[in-house]
Amino acid sequence: MAVFSVIGIGTFLLTPILAIVTLLSLRAIYNLHFHRLSSQFPGPWYTAVSSLPLAIISYRRRELEWIQNLAYKYGTDCPIRIAPNLLVLLRPEDLREIYADPKCNTKSEFYNIGVLGPKQLFSTMPADEHRELRAALGGKPACSLEWTIGSLKNTWEVRIDQLIALFINKMSERAGNKMIVDLGDKMGQVFLEFASDFLTIAAFTDAWGFVQNDRDERGILANWLEGLDMIGFMDRSEFVREYILKNPLFSRLLPKMSDESSMGYLMSKAQEQLNLRESQLKTDTKEVPKDFLQHCIDARLNGSPLTQEQKFAHVVLLIGVGALATGTALSSTLRFLAMNPGKLLKVQTEIDEANLAGELSNPVQYDEVREHLYYFCACLNESLRLNPPATNIYPRVVGEGGKYVRDHFISAKAEVTSYSFVIQRDPKLYAPDPDVFRPERWLESAEKAAEMEAGSFVFGKGARNCLGKSVAMFELNKLLPEV
C-alpha cells in the first residue's frame, strides 16, 4: 500500500507539470509553424517561440545592439519578427507606414501595464479614445496654443532664465570647489535635476527645488531609473502582461499616494497641487497661472472636464517621463561634444562670436539660439539622432484587412514597430558615415536636412507624436549654450 501511495502522490505532482510542459510545447509549435507571421518574415527562431527572449534582452540592456545586429543579418527590406506577434520595420520611410497610417492607429497591450501611474494619453490604446483625449489636451488649435514654442517663450522664458542662472551658479560653485561633475554619464544627475525643476515650473509654476537643494527630491529620479529595466521586461513579456499585471494582487506592489518618497510621493504631490488649485479657483479666477496643471483643469473632453484622475495622471507623466528624456538628451549632447574636441571648439567659437556681436542675451533667449547658433543646433540634431533619449519599441496593431509594406503583406492584428536607434543610423540616408557624430550633415542643404528630419523618430510620428516636443526642444536650446 505504501508503494502505491508513493506512486499516487508522484503521479499527482507530475501530472500538472506534464500538462504545463505540453501546453508550452504546443504553443511553441503553433508560433513557429502555424502563426499568422510564421512563414513569411525572417527573424531568430527563439523570439518566434515566445516573447520572453525579447523581454530578457531588454532587461539585460542588450536591445539596442541586438536589433542593430538583426538589421545587419537580415537586412531592412523585409520586416523582422522579434516576438511571436511583433514585427520591427527598420527603414526611415517605414515610419509613415506605421505611425501615419490610420489603419495602425491603435496601440498594443505593450502600453497597458499600469506602472506609469493612472491611465493617460500615452497609455490610451484605442484610436478614437486617444483622438478625443489628445484634442482635449492639445490637439485642437485653441488648446495647442498653450504649448507651442511661442507660448512657452511668452509665458515661461523669464522663469526658466531664473532657473538657468541658478543652475549655472551651482555649477560654478562646484567648479570653484574643484568638484568633479560627471557629464559623460548617459543620464547625468545634474541634468536630470535641472529637467525635473524645468518641468515642475511648467506643470505647477514653481520649481520643487531639485537644483536649489542639489539633490534628487524624495528619490523620484532614482526610483524611475531603478525601475526602467523591469518596466522594459514587463511590457515585452506577453505572459507577464496577461497573467501577472492583470492580477489584482499586483496592484499592491505599485506606488501609492501614501508613500513618502519616489513615484508615490510624485503622485501625492501632484494630487495635492491639483486640490489646492481647484480650491483657489473657487474664490479667485483673476490670477490663474498658465501652467500645465491649469491646462488640464481647463481641458474639456466631449464638453466635460477631465476626471480628477485624468488631470493629475498627465501631470505625473509630464514630470516623470519628461525629466528622464530631456535629462538624457542634455547629458548625451555634452558627452558627444566632449568626445569630439574639434566640434566643441566650433560651438564655443560660434557662441563667443555671436556674443561679441551683441546677438546673445544673458541668459540666451530661444529665438537667439535658433537665429544665430546654427552649428550648435546642428550638434543638437546630431546628438538626438545618434542617441535618441526615449529609444524603445512602440507597437501598433494592424487594422482590419491587414496592409502591405513594400511587397510584404502584414495580417490584421499583427503588431508593428520601428526602432529609433537603428533607423536613425540608416546607411543610405546618413551615408557615408551613419555611426559618426558629424553635425555638418545638417548644414549641407535644406533639402537634405528636411529628409533627415522626416526620418527622425525622436518625438514619434503621426497623430500620436509626443505632445511635449516643444517643451523638450525649448529646454535643450535654452540650457546647453549657457553650459
Image: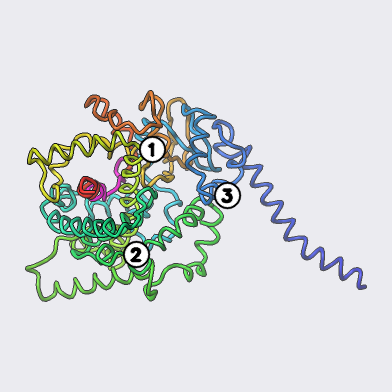
Q: Find out whether residue 398 is within the magenta segment.
A: no
Is label 2 in contact with label 1 (beta carbons under 8 Å)? no
Q: Are marks 3 and 1 in contact (CB under 8 Å)?
A: no
Identity, as a three-letter code, of the amino acid under mark 3? Leu
In 3D space, how far apart are the residues under numbered discs 2 and 1 (Cα atoms)? 38 Å
Q: Which-is-in-front pick, marks 2 and 1?
A: 2
Q: Residues within 10 Å of mark 3 (few under 14, many from 20)?
A: many
472 up-or-down from 265: above or below: above
Residue 459 visible in the current orientation: no
Badge 3 is on which residue?
Answer: 52
**What's the distance in space between the residues labelled 2 and 3, CA to CA?**
34 Å
Q: Which residue is mark 2?
A: 216
Q: Where, by quadrant of the figure, is residue 2 drawn?
A: bottom right
The CA span between labels 3 and 1 is 24 Å
* On screen, residue 434 above or below 36: above
Instruction: Name the spot of residue 123 as percent of width and height, x first.
Output: 37, 55
